[in-house]
Image (cartoon, grey):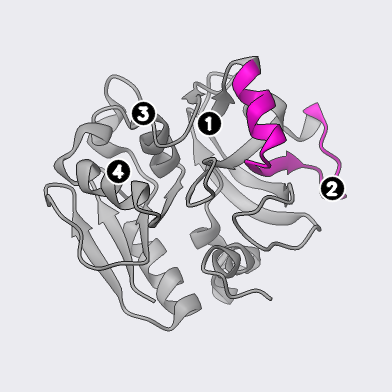
């Protein structure tokens, strides 16, 4: 298994993500620079959280035109697995590798706290059905797409994660940003591109008091039976 994490100007979760992936996979994770024009032989490429290009224009908009993104699009089209976390999710929507858009939080404030999410039974990963406690940290995590796209994603099991209560209830009160249908993460129609707003890499070390993120990373890497 070969993994890589891309660093953009303004990425601030790339090192955390590399350390978490190395812990989960037991493999050395490669680093890829946004100005690179090609990818090494890989199984997975991850786009980390942060504030790429200072979040100018829209979060992820400028990063979606970085030289490396042409290689990532080709990689995804050939079936390579691409994962975007927080700003990485925003980049994937801006690059049209995932449908919809991440709008400003309904509160119009930066939101940084632990929330609960649960798997929606998608075909991308094998996750437990119970809620997982994962941190979020974003200003633009309010997922939106037109009704016809939402219906298509529901029909194809593309909704990967939804915000929920500690008891697993998917209700408006559990939604931290106004996201449509409590959506916290989605995948593409072929299940090889995943975007999610919560940060599993920030909940992957016992020293942080929470390892629920490890469960997500293990599932993404196909290590759960």
Using the image, determine if residue 191 lies above or below residue 110: below
SS for tag 3?
helix
Image position of 160 (left or right of 101):
right
Q: CA distance from mark 1 to mark 4?
A: 23 Å
Give percent across and percent down for residue 144. Answer: 57, 22
SS for tag 1?
loop
SS for tag 2?
loop
Check residue 94 in the rendering and tell me which mark sits there, or answer none.
Answer: 3
Give percent across and percent down for residue 77. Answer: 35, 46
For marks 4 and 2, the one nearer the N-term is 4
Residue neighbourhood size for the residue with mark 4, other residues' Cα within 10 Å, grouped as few (<14), some (14–19), many (≥20): some
Q: Where the C terminus falls, by quadrant?
A: bottom right
Q: Is 114 covered by the magenta stretch?
A: no
Q: CA distance from mark 1 to mark 2?
A: 20 Å
Q: Look at mark 1 in the image and give the residue it sits on.
A: 141
Residue neighbourhood size for the residue with mark 3, other residues' Cα within 10 Å, grouped as few (<14), some (14–19), many (≥20): many
Q: Look at mark 2 in the image and give the residue it sits on.
A: 168
Q: Nearer the viewer, residue 11 or 45?
A: 45
SS for tag 4?
helix
Q: In the rendered structure, are the residues bearing label 4 and label 2 in contact, judged by CB atoms less than 8 Å apart?
A: no
Count of number-bearing discs: 4
Q: Look at mark 4 in the image and give the residue it sits on.
A: 73
Q: In the rendered structure, are the residues bearing label 4 and label 3 in contact, judged by CB atoms less than 8 Å apart?
A: no
Give percent across and percent down for residue 82. Answer: 40, 52
Magenta part of the chain = 148-172
For marks 4 and 3, the one nearer the N-term is 4
For marks 3 and 1, the one nearer the N-term is 3
């Amino acid at each position: 298994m070969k993994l890589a994490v891309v660093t953009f100007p303004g990425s601030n979760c790339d090192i955390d993500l590399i350390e978490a992936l190395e812990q989960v996979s037991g493999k050395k994770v490669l680093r890829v620079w946004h100005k690179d024009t090609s990818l090494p032989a890989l199984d997975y490429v991850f786009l980390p959280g942060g504030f790429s290009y200072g979040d100018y224009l829209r979060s992820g908009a400028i990063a979606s035109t970085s030289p490396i993104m042409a290689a990532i699009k080709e990689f995804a089209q050939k079936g390579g697995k691409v994962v975007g976390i927080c700003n990485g999710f925003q980049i994937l929507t801006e690059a049209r590798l995932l449908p919809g858009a991440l709008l400003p939080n309904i509160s119009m404030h930066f939101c940084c706290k632990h929330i609960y999410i649960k798997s929606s039974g998608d075909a991308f990963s094998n996750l437990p059905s119970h809620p997982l406690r994962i941190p979020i940290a974003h200003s633009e995590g309010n997922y939106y797409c037109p009704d016809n796209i939402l219906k298509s994603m529901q029909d194809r099991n593309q909704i990967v994660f939804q915000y929920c209560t500690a008891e697993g209830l998917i209700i408006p009160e559990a939604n931290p940003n106004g996201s449509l249908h409590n959506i916290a993460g989605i995948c593409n129609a072929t299940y090889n591109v995943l975007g999610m707003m919560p940060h599993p890499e920030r909940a992957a070390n016992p020293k942080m008091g929470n390892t629920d993120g490890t469960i997500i990373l293990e599932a993404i890497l196909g290590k759960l039976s």
